[in-house]
Image (cartoon, helix red, strand yellow):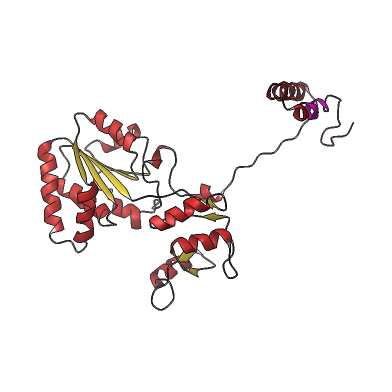
Amino acid sequence: MASPPLEDGLPDRRILAAASLAGADRVYAMGGAQAIAALSLGTESVGRADVVVGPGNKYVASAKKQLFGEVGIDFVAGPTDVLVIADAAADPDLVAADLLAQAEHDPDARARALVPSRLFAQSVSSAVDRRLAVLSTAATARVSLDAGGVLLVYATIEEAVRTADRIAPEHLELHLADAGALAPAFRNFGSLFIGSRAAEAFGDYSAGINHTLPTSGSARFTGGLSVRHFLKTVTTLRGTEGSGYDAARDAAMRIARAEGLAAHEASAKARTSVTRPGTGQN
């Protein structure tokens, strides 16, 4: 694991405690693009990794993108984002609280909501202003909201579903009376928070679901970091005598001929004589 050092030269002790509980056997006091480079290529003191995963700032994301191929990665993460879908029964103050919880991450964070009416949008906006007035991270949150905060009124819940799937948010919150029934209609999201009690902050810290998720619309084609990123799929082939073997050989010959690859065709044709299974010998 790699984590940036503090003034004492070590990562935050709370990070070290979490790493110990998780069973980490090696911790490097480094961060940023230089940490990605060291792990990807190896140095005299840092072993070369096969896979590098986890979140970071835009420089970390750029380094992972440039070094993909030298090393496996989970995905290239952009600015964090949330999309809240609320209906008329939802609490505007809860919607505002969750938008601000996203906006305070950094100025590039994107906090957006789909709401049922202009009146509801005004209520959310007023709640955001009230909370900003007493929020210790208001400076960052305000820049984020000014740059990319959105309250969009939808005509029907079906329109809201279609819009959400086009946006493909990192975090999708359903502040809906029938959230459980509607949840299967959504396809593109990093993590889905079903019902107003399911705060994204729980997903970030304590509920046990993934916190490293696809951003910038990439939830259209990938999910979050998981065990599968540390697994690889491999294939094996064994040939045994029979009609299926003959059909596969003949098909390979025809396809090779069509592609103009004569050695491929010859390699397949050389298997025309009967061979002893598993030996490759006549």
Residue 167 is situated, as x and y percent measured from the top left of the image, at: 32, 38
The answer to which quarter of the image holds residue 48 is bottom right
Q: Which residues are magenta?
A: 265-282
Q: Residue furthest right?
A: 282
Q: Residue at x 15, y 49 (%)?
A: 93
The answer to which quarter of the image holds residue 274 is top right
Pick the quarter of the image with the C terminus.
top right
Q: Is residue 270 magenta?
A: yes
In the drawing, does residue 107 fall left or right of residue 52?
left
Which one is in front, 151 or 87?
151
In the drawing, does residue 273 fall left or right of residue 47?
right
Which one is in front, 204 or 152?
152
In the drawing, does residue 170 fall left or right of residue 19?
left
Residue 87 is situated, as x and y percent measured from the top left of the image, at: 19, 37
Q: Residue furthest front?
A: 260
Residue 154 is situated, as x and y percent measured from the top left of the image, at: 20, 32
Q: Residue at x 47, y 55 (%)?
A: 63
Q: Residue at x 15, y 37 (%)?
A: 88
Number of numbered labels in the structure image: 0
Residue 182 is situated, as x and y percent measured from the top left of the image, at: 29, 33
Helix, strand or loop: magenta stretch = loop
Residue 206 in view, yes or no: no
Image: 238 above or below 52: above
Q: Residue at x 43, y 76 (%)?
A: 9
Residue 84 in view, yes or no: yes
Q: Is residue 155 magenta?
A: no
Q: Residue furthest bottom?
A: 8
